[in-house]
């Protein structure tokens, strides 16, 4: 190619690229170098799941992750409807959603803020928030959607962030070969997943039976024992040391007339209240790595019949758990506030 043709070709590329919107360039970056994340959540139980989901959208805005799917392990129509609201509001209406049937009984464990927000109306009785999906009963079961998504990804490329019960993950491990892949679930995970990061367990108090473990103990046992990739868990004692402040909910989102996460926070408990950031810490580690935390040595995690979790150091193990001191906890809290309150790239 002559110099003149090289110059013209380069100039043409610059003209085309300069005409792309920020969203176009962001999409190109997501395809090229963003981390591939699947989010597993019991959204609608504790409001920290909603905050964690907002974090993921902000990482999407920055081109740092490609959110391949959102898997729900709280049963009912309102959790996927709320996720659809959140996806739509943040400008990502096409993120696939997987649901669960015959899951853990948790409907009466807390105020279902997903239901609360989904039922909100404007003065003219129209829904307060837009949706993108028409029939939530047609959504696939999560363990099947996992197979579809994982089969399409490069080897050793996907991080799963699990902030609820282990039911969907255990079911995934037990899946047989199908039209998506000739591999079993465990083989597919071993081939495609590089890391599972969970919010689960408690390692500084053997008497505490952490909620995400207790709601499906057999599934938790299976995942901690059989999951074939490295597994890092953020336990109860980490999230409870870092409280998201009510003053931020009240003051830092005034750029939005209504915000589905803020409304969820207000539904969940009487304001003002600070809330532990259990699920957010798992998202933070999964996307930004270990720099904010102390990490245990390699080892193994055992789940008792009562739901306790115990850690045994073992250089041949591939289970780890996170820890924070007071300085780290404050740094993480400030980082959460800065990230979550950032105006979305697609906000109008």
Image: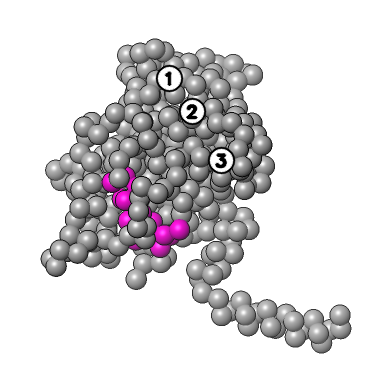
- Front in this rendered view, residue 342 or 120: 120
- Tell which residue pokes out farthest to the right in this image: 2
Quadrant of image for the C terminus: bottom left
Q: Is residue 82 magenta?
A: yes
Q: How many labels does the image show?
A: 3
Mark 1 falls on what kind of element?
Answer: helix
Residue 76 appears in the picture as rendered: yes
271 vs 205: above or below:
below
User: Which x, y percent locates residue 34?
Assistant: 57, 53
What residue does disc 1 label?
Answer: 218
Residue appearing at x 56%, y 80% in the figure:
19
- Residue 213 appears at what percent x and percent y? 38, 24
Q: Nearer the viewer, residue 14 or 109?
A: 109
Question: Disc number at residue 170?
Answer: 2
Q: Whole-Å distance between the Cαs marked 3 and 2?
A: 13 Å
Q: What stretch is highlighted in magenta?
A: 78-94
Which residue is drawn at the image coordinates 14% and 67% (left, top)? 124
Q: Residues within 10 Å of mark 1 (few under 14, many from 20)?
A: some
Q: Where is residue 123 in the image (x, y as percent from the top left)?
A: 13, 66
For label 3, the crowd category at 10 Å Cα-Cα, with few meaning under 14, some 14 to 19 and many 20 or more, is many
For the residues labelled 1 and 2, the Cα–Cα distance comes to: 9 Å
What secondary structure is found at the residue carrying circle 2? helix
| Labels 1 and 2: the sequence-earlier one | 2
Q: Nearer the viewer, residue 2 or 113?
A: 113
Q: Which residue is drawn at 33% across and 28% down?
A: 104
58 to 184, vertically: above or below: below
Residue identified by numbered label 3: 147
């Amino acid at each position: 190619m002559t110099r003149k043709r090289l110059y013209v070709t380069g100039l043409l590329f610059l003209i085309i690229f300069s005409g792309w919107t920020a969203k176009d360039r962001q999409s190109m970056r997501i395809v090229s170098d963003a981390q591939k994340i699947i989010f597993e959540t019991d959204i609608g139980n504790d409001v920290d799941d909603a905050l964690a989901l907002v974090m993921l959208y902000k990482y999407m805005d920055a081109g740092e992750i490609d959110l391949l799917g959102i898997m729900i392990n709280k049963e009912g129509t309102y959790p996927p409807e709320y996720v659809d609201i959140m996806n739509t509001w943040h400008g990502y209406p096409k993120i696939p959603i997987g649901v669960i049937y015959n899951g853990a009984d948790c409907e009466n464990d807390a105020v279902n803020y997903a239901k609360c927000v989904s039922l909100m109306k404007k003065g003219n009785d129209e829904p307060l928030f837009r949706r993108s999906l028409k029939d939530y009963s047609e959504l696939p079961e999560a363990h099947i959607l996992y197979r579809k998504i994982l089969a399409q990804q490069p080897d050793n490329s996907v991080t799963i962030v699990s902030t609820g019960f282990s039911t969907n993950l255990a079911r995934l491990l037990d899946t047989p070969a199908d039209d998506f892949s000739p591999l079993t679930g465990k083989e597919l995970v071993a081939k495609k997943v590089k890391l599972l990061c969970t919010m689960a367990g408690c390692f500084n108090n053997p008497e505490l039976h952490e909620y995400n473990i207790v709601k499906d103990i057999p599934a938790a046992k299976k995942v901690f024992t059989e999951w074939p990739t490295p597994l890092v868990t953020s336990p109860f004692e980490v999230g409870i040391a870092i409280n998201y402040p009510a003053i931020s909910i009240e003051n830092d989102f005034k750029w939005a007339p209504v915000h589905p996460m803020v409304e969820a926070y207000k539904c969940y408990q009487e304001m003002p209240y600070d809330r532990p950031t259990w699920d957010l810490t798992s998202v933070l580690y999964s996307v930004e790595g270990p720099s904010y935390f102390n990490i245990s040595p390699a080892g193994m995690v055992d789940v008792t019949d009562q739901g306790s979790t115990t850690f045994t150091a073992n250089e041949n193990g591939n289970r780890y758990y996170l820890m924070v001191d007071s300085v780290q906890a404050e740094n993480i809290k400030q980082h959460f506030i800065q990230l979550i309150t950032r105006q979305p790239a697609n906000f109008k």
